[in-house]
Amino acid sequence: MCPPLPAAQRVLLRHPSSDDAAELLRLVNSSRRLHHPWVFPPADEKAVASYLRNAASDRLLGFLVCLRESEEIVGVVNLSEIVYGNFLSAYLGFYGHAEHAGRGYMKEGLHLVLRHAFRTLGLHRIEANVQPGNGRSLALLQALGFKKEGYSPKYLKIGGRWRDHERWAILAEEWRVRG
């Protein structure tokens, strides 16, 4: 049996399931203006089904950030390219939904994912790569204690274009001091 996922005052985490497909598709499509050009989440039935099939594997763990009271989905967080052994590291990706933006729910949800990554999974380092113009995501990472490590030109292909990214990371011991 899997350990229960953590919860905070206003949000909880849960893993996505096929039952979430319609709501995820609705939320992504209603949040296009918020997401673009920063992230292109699965936006059709086939892409959502593929994400849901792959959201729990050795290399990818998907989380839904949900309101505690209603369990309504407010955002998605992914830990990908999870490596154990001597590396104990993963990449962090995330996006919120427009109807819940600016309320701090994603900050609470990301804090819970970091707690899960460091305490339950035993990871040592989490890295997030964000486009330089994405001020909201950069501010969120800074608020969570991530430190900028560098700049990667044409790092990731997003929306059909190679885009520059800032590389941010947090270590388990840094998180514990803040957490």
Image (cartoon, rainbow, N blue to C red):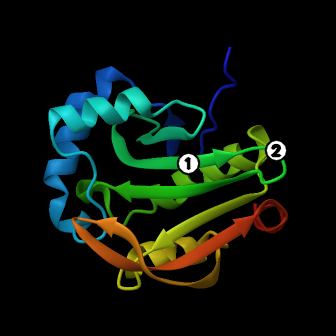
| Badge 1: residue crowd in 10 Å (few <14, some 14–19, many ≥20) | many
What number is the disc on residue 128?
none
What residue do we see at 38% from left, 26% from top?
A: 53
Whether residue 20 sits left or right of residue 89 in the image: it is left
Q: Residue 169 location in percent, x, y?
A: 65, 70
| Nearer the observer, 102 or 172 | 172
Q: Which residue occupies the extreme top position in the image?
A: 1
Q: Quadrant of residue 22?
A: top left
Task: Say which residue label 2 marks.
Answer: 85
Give SS at disc 1: strand
The residue wearing badge 1 is 79
| Amino acid type for the residue under numbered disc 2 | Gly
Above or below, 152 relative to 84: below
Residue 55 vs 19, above or below: the answer is: below
What residue is drawn where x is 19% and y is 39%?
Answer: 25
The C terminus - image quarter: bottom right
Q: Position of residue 173 (x, y in %)?
A: 85, 63
- In the figure, is residue 89 to the left or right of 56? right
Q: x, y (%) of residue 136?
A: 40, 76
Q: CA distance from mark 1 to mark 2?
A: 17 Å
Counting from the top left corner in percent of width and height, residue 28 is at: 22, 49
